[in-house]
Amino acid sequence: MVKNVRIKILIFFFSCCLFSQGLPAQTPVCESLFTDVYSIDSQKAGEVDLCIDNISFFKNTETGGDVQKGYTLPGFRIHPRLTYYPASMIKLEAGVSLLRYWGADKYPNYAYRDIAEWKASGYQLGFHLLPFFRAQIQPIPQLNIVLGHIYGGSNHGLIEPLYNPELNLTADPEMGAQIIYNSRAVHFDAWVNWETFTFKNEANNEAVTMGASGRFHITNPQSFFYLGVPVQAVINHHGGEIDLINGKVKSLANGAAGLQFGFNLNNPTFKYLGLSLMGAGYRNLYSEEPFLFKQGWAAYSNLNLRVWDFDLKVNFWRSGDFVNLFGNPVFGNVSTSKENWNFPRIMVFNPGIKYERKFGNGFYLGADFECFIAPAFAEYEGLVPVKMEKYFGTTAGLFLRINPSIVLKK
């Protein structure tokens, strides 16, 4: 059974990869707080740099309670590392990854995918600490192959219902393998994030996430009018052949595709206007958990306007029987605050504003505020409980990223 599930996952994943390579992409919204430059500068051959990559944050979420619970994230992440360029096409990075929440002095000692659940059996003092290592080769200017710590999180360019940007502050850096291809017409990112490794007879399952994000530009992204087609897929698998915990295998998939229209206004005040229209899907490839839907659908639209250093957005989401693997729980049909609660049909209106400004090379200040508004969920026969009240939630955050690179040896 496990082998059959793995074969189905690989077929689905590589089909998405091949499909995405022939499809177009979107012009990304300006985003430097949570993304990194992945291309290798060929002029740095033989150079050794010290990178002090820090983001300090204060983020607060206020919610209605039935979908998710409110919480506050005060703290910082820091990734100090040495970067060595042994050749014009190779980059090696080694260091540590540290996460600190103000007011906490010890942290659960296991992989984080979100705000970690407390387990007293194993913990770290002071910080949640992990070693950091990345090996990267760029055989041609358009292609990058990465092993170790990959360019994850917001670097994948997934829409918000498929990836919650807040995970940049809470989840462990992604580790595994990645291929990035970027040309004038195509941007393609395929990755494997190995979340949990298991030894024989260990009391947990293997956990791995595979994803593909393809962007193909029908028109030049720098032209006045832009037209592109984004295609995205994410699969999360829990299982393994060395040992299974009570036979519990789980494989879930999300995907999205659509069109993006954009206008590069070339105006110092009004810089960009864009509209995305996408359809999304959810598929339960294999799971024994009874409360999970077998498959689901969603419609997503995003209107974005960039004015000075502000991004104004309005998102609209309508879904049925949809389980989002890494997206904001507000966009999912399964409650994260009450066990075994689900909502077969939801609709979310999500306006927001974000400020981001660069101060010198590697210094960024950001702030955001957004609302999540949902009307009463429609009653659905045969499934209980049914939430009939309106939902209203807000999030607000302040961020400072300090990411200087200091040359130690030319």
Image: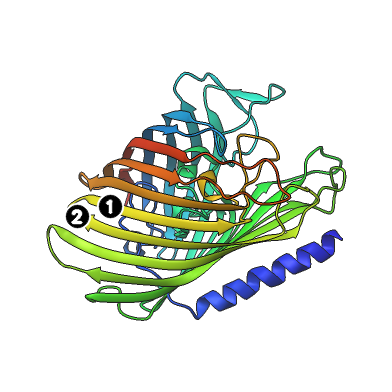
Q: Position of residue 95 (x, y in %)?
A: 49, 40
Q: CA distance from mark 2 to mark 1?
A: 8 Å
**Is the image coloured rainbow, by chain, by secondary structure, or in one colour?**
rainbow
In this rendering, is residue 390 above or below 162?
Answer: above
Circle 1 is placed at which residue position? 312
Residue nearest the observer in this picture, 66 or 167 = 66
Residue at figure coordinates x 77%, y 68% from the top left = 7
Residue at figure coordinates x 61%, y 39% from the top left = 336
Residue at figure coordinates x 46%, y 44% from the top left = 168
Residue nearest the observer in this picture, 317 or 111 = 317
Q: Position of residue 302 (x, y in %)?
A: 38, 60
Q: Position of residue 382 (x, y in %)?
A: 73, 50
Q: Amino acid at mark 1?
A: Leu
Q: Position of residue 231 (x, y in %)?
A: 50, 70
In this rendering, is residue 271 above or below 214?
Answer: above
Circle 2 is placed at which residue position? 307
Left or right position of 313 against 155: left
Residue at figure coordinates x 63%, y 39% from the top left = 111
Q: Secondary structure at mark 1?
A: strand
Residue nearest the observer in this picture, 6 or 77 = 6
Q: Secondary structure at mark 2?
A: strand
Left or right position of 26 against 210: left
Q: Which mark is drawn over residue 275?
A: none
Dot 2 crowding, Cα within 10 Å, few <14, some 14–19, many 20+: some
In this view of the protein, can residue 326 be seen by the observer?
no
Dot 1 crowding, Cα within 10 Å, few <14, some 14–19, many 20+: some
Residue nearest the observer in this picture, 408 or 116 = 116
Split into 4 quadrants, where in the image is the N terminus?
Answer: bottom right
Q: Are marks 2 and 1 in contact (CB under 8 Å)?
A: yes
Q: Residue 184 sits in which quadrant?
A: bottom left
Q: Amino acid at mark 2?
A: Val
